[in-house]
Image: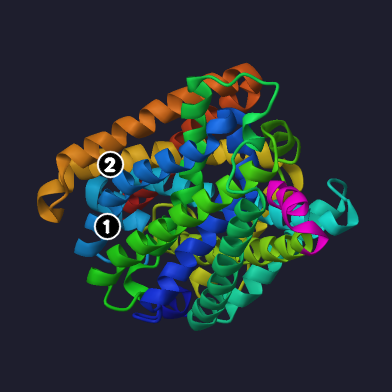
Amino acid sequence: MSGNERESTYEEESISLSGAVAMGTGVMIGAGIFALTGQIAELAGPLFPLAFIAGAIITGLSAHSYVKMSNTWPSSGGIAMILNKCYGPGAITGGAALLMALSMVIAESLVARTFATYLLQPFDITSGPLVPVLAVGVILFAFFVNIAGNRSVGMFSIAMAVLKIGGIAMFGIAALWSSGFSFSEALEGSQDFGYTGLIASVALAILSFKGFTTITNSGAEITKPHRNVGRAIAIAIMLCVAIYLLVAFGVGSSLSIDEIIRARDYSLAKAAQPALGQIGFMLTVVLAVVATASAVLASVFAVSRMLAMLTEMKLIPHSHFGMPGPIQKHTLVYTVVIAAILAVFFDLSRIASLGVYFYLIMDMIIHWGVLRYRREETGAMPAILISALMADAVVLIAFTAMKLQSDPIIVATGIGSVVLLMGLERIYLHTWLAELEDAHSH
């Protein structure tokens, strides 16, 4: 196979502004509403809607780095491009980009298991072998849609986004209406929640907004990227803030905190039943299935392209394993295989916790890089960059403090994985550069 065939191929300006917004909201709404609402309430208690507000504010600060860099250098490698522009082709760029890619793969497995959990709700099945089987099934579905090409992804994402945003908004309004616009149910509970829990919950809320990076990773493929990447990110975040708050208050008006925590993997369906009856419950299940399926689809699309760019930049090893076609098809296979493995062997809480460590550490590396090396060229504002960096650090420390009490193993796994990944990346690059120098000397 020729070198040209091995290279990844990108369709410039193949994704419209609306398609980019749909992809971003697809990832965010799938994770934030259906997969993480219960986990956020478990940490924050009755104040859990505030976690979404705080998460949106911090995400808005963080988006400044990505928008400024993407407007200056739009690229289908997104995060990899930003890191390379800041740090050059080295271990920091490769390691941090892999952290981002893995955090997105983690999100895919998280949302895939949520898809399975909601799909099984009408049958009163909350665990067992069917959960991972269905999770793997939706990941494979995303794989085949992505194989069909960018325009198929864009059209599918737009259709799904319109359906789920409208449906979820109707759920939130109906739940609030049936409760007389009261939030009293969520105020009832037997647990005490402190401010540390609220701050820690913001880490999960940030994770629910991180889908905006899906737009960044498709930069050069978006029409008029110098203008539309930033616009798509801003629109997607604002849409999700409105939807998250509407649903958070809708759930809180129907269920107590104890009930939300008990049903944390399927809290929306549980909240729909007392508010809207059995029909509302079934409609919520359908919405959840649609939202989570489209979230997996959009995330697979973005991760495969980031990994393809890292491969072309020689920052990560690559093997074809006898597969035909361009690199981006190979990285698509790698993405779905890793996501499927995680979906089979890890539960929702631990998957989300790993995602927090990978994403927030990568995010801080990006803010520091833009602040240190690229703020003048991009016009990025130092005050916003420093604020985003500090907010990430505070939230990550609070999250770690909470997890050390409840699940110290996941703290060790998260931090250990980051250190191991960075170390392996450094070893790989050192070996590759040595081989390159040896070839040149001959």
Q: Looking at the picture, how far across and down is residue 382, in whole percent? A: 16, 40
Earlier sequence position, callout 2 versus callout 1: 1
Q: Looking at the picture, how far across and down is residue 407, in whole percent? A: 65, 23
Magenta highlight: main SS: helix
Q: Disc 2 marks which amino acid?
A: His
Q: Which residues are magenta?
A: 266-279
Up the image or down, 217 lies above or below 50; here it is: below
Q: Which residue is mark 2?
A: 367
Q: Looking at the picture, how far across and down is residue 357, in whole percent? A: 49, 35
Up the image or down, 378 lies above or below 423; here it is: below
Is residue 434 rendered to the left or right of residue 375?
right
Q: Which residue is mark 1?
A: 67
Mark 1 lies on a secondary structure that is: helix
Up the image or down, 388 lies above or below 93; here it is: above
Label for residue 37? none
Q: Nearer the viewer, residue 336 or 65?
A: 65
Mark 2 lies on a secondary structure that is: helix
What residue appears at the point 50 percent right and 75 percent down from the top-left corner? Answer: 326
What residue appears at the point 56 percent right and 62 percent down from the top-left corner? Answer: 169
What residue appears at the point 10 percent right and 49 percent down from the top-left corner? Answer: 376
Q: Is residue 296 visible?
A: no
Kindly give the residue lying farthest to the left in the view shown.
376
What residue appears at the point 50 percent right and 60 percent down from the top-left corner? Answer: 303
Considering the image in quadrants, where does the C terminus appear? bottom left
Badge 2: few (under 14), some or many (20 or more) residues near its Cα, within 10 Å? many
Residue 38, by quadrant, is top right
Badge 1: few (under 14), some or many (20 or more) residues near its Cα, within 10 Å? many
Check residue 267 for magenta coloring.
yes
Q: Nearer the viewer, residue 435 or 66?
A: 66
Q: Disc 1 marks which amino acid?
A: Val
Check residue 425 for magenta coloring.
no
